[in-house]
Amino acid sequence: MINFSEVSETNAMIEKENLDVRTITMGISLLDCIDSDLETLKKNIYNKIYKSAKDLVRTGEEISHDYGIPIVNKRISVTPIALIGGSACRSTDDFVELALTLDRAAKDVGVNFLGGYSALVSKGMTGADRLLIESIPDALSRTDLVCSSVNVGSTRTGIDMDAVRLLGRVIRQTAEKTADRDSLGCAKLVVFCNAPDDNPFMAGAFHGVTEADRILNIGVSGPGVVKKALESVHGESFEVLCETVKKTAFKVTRVGQLVAREASERLGVPFGIIDLSLAPTPAIGDSVADILCEMGLEYAGAPGTTAALALLNDQVKKGGVMASSYVGGLSGAFIPVSEDQGMIDAVKAGALSLEKLEAMTCVCSVGLDMIAIPGDTSASTISGIIADEMAIGMVNQKTTAVRVIPVIGKGVGEQVEFGGLLGYAPIMSVNPFSCEEFIKRKGRIPAPIHSFKN
């Protein structure tokens, strides 16, 4: 039973502490759309998405109105398009045609983003995988709502360094093709190790082949709520700190569970998972970095930051899993730079570097996320950054990702504005020394010894 004080407390979280349901994401399988004729395939994809998601936005708005819970985004994820387009697409232009179809379907049903322009290549690339990856710069420059992801590694298979090398070039080309928009295309592209099949957050969402025909995944978020709770136990012991985070994460996740149940019933679509991530926004008071500061750090990036983030991530998961039977996705604490005002302040103060962010990714839920870097950063350096982050995920048996934005025409000390939830970011410096000879090597980095468990 929920008592009156809990209702009042939840209302306060929503009104004063930026509690929201960040996204309702409908996953849609496109496996039954496959056809060897490109025009037929495009028609099948559009019809399946429109029929499945035509009521998604309206239903989300009705739930938000009925319960007074902000639902910020309504999104769609689809089966990785490299799998769907393999039999019909003979060129990169053919894959771009599919991206345009996805974009039109997303706009017609009214969602904010559509994810799944993706390839899964942790052990090697098929011809279709390579064509899709090479098409990403054109696809993201010609669409507005389509998001792309590529999984290049896993703990069980190692890291496909041929794909890592290719993606360094692809990210640079995407930046150049969207240079008139401050290289915004790269904000819609993420490279993964150990990518989950049920992630509701963009740009990495796709509908895994192990999922049902349609599914609803919910992403909840409440950094402001956690910070406010910690203010009430300022200076207390680590035991009290941990208990406070766990209890708060439980309450936040229950809100997501309520929305998930309602959306599932109203849409007639099975509930998948709740991703209980602390996902910040540029809004003041909605920052993961501010939580770390409330724990006792002058800025995110100060000594002790990795330990504080590890504590936060673990306690969020421990509290959240008690509030829902189905927790999945990424779940934990996101540390995107452009989307977190506290992180931006830390970079400007000189407290937070790319190397420190990389260390923090060893214990957080995602990786190097929404980081603006100089526009003249070489493709091999970008590949080196990806390789480092993929190795962290592979060895630690966790999801890691890279979403870096080389902003063409801008350098360290300048700032870039992305707008909306993507926020703004200072351009961060990148290690100037070359890794080109390393990246030029062909093949795979093998899986670590502890991956062999059969």
Image (cartoon, helix red, strand yellow):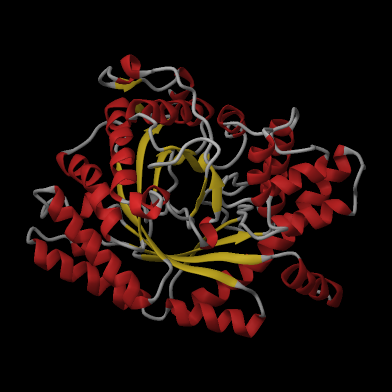
Q: Is residue 14 visible?
A: yes
Instruction: Tell me the quarter of the image containing the C terminus.
Output: top left
Front residue of 197/311: it is 311
Front residue of 71/37: it is 71
Instruction: Tell me the quarter of the image containing the N terminus.
Output: bottom right
Q: Is residue 1 visible?
A: no
Residue name at image x 26 percent, y 48 percent: 136
Residue 266, above or below 366: below
Left-right relation of 40 to 254: left
State the image coordinates of residue 237 (x, y, percent, origin top left): 91, 39
Residue name at image x 69 percent, y 37 percent: 349
Residue name at image x 73 percent, y 58 percent: 285
Front residue of 177/17: it is 177
Residue 185, above or below 160: below
State the image coordinates of residue 235 (x, y, percent, origin top left): 92, 42
Left-right relation of 446 to 237: left
Residue name at image x 61 percent, y 84 percent: 65
State the image coordinates of residue 266 (x, y, percent, origin top left): 49, 81
Residue 167, above or below 415: above
In the current view of this chain or complex, which residue is farthest to the top? 437
Residue 305, above or below 370: above
State the image coordinates of residue 57 (x, y, percent, origin top left): 45, 77
Q: Residue 229 is drawn in which quadrant?
A: bottom right
Q: How many marks?
A: 0
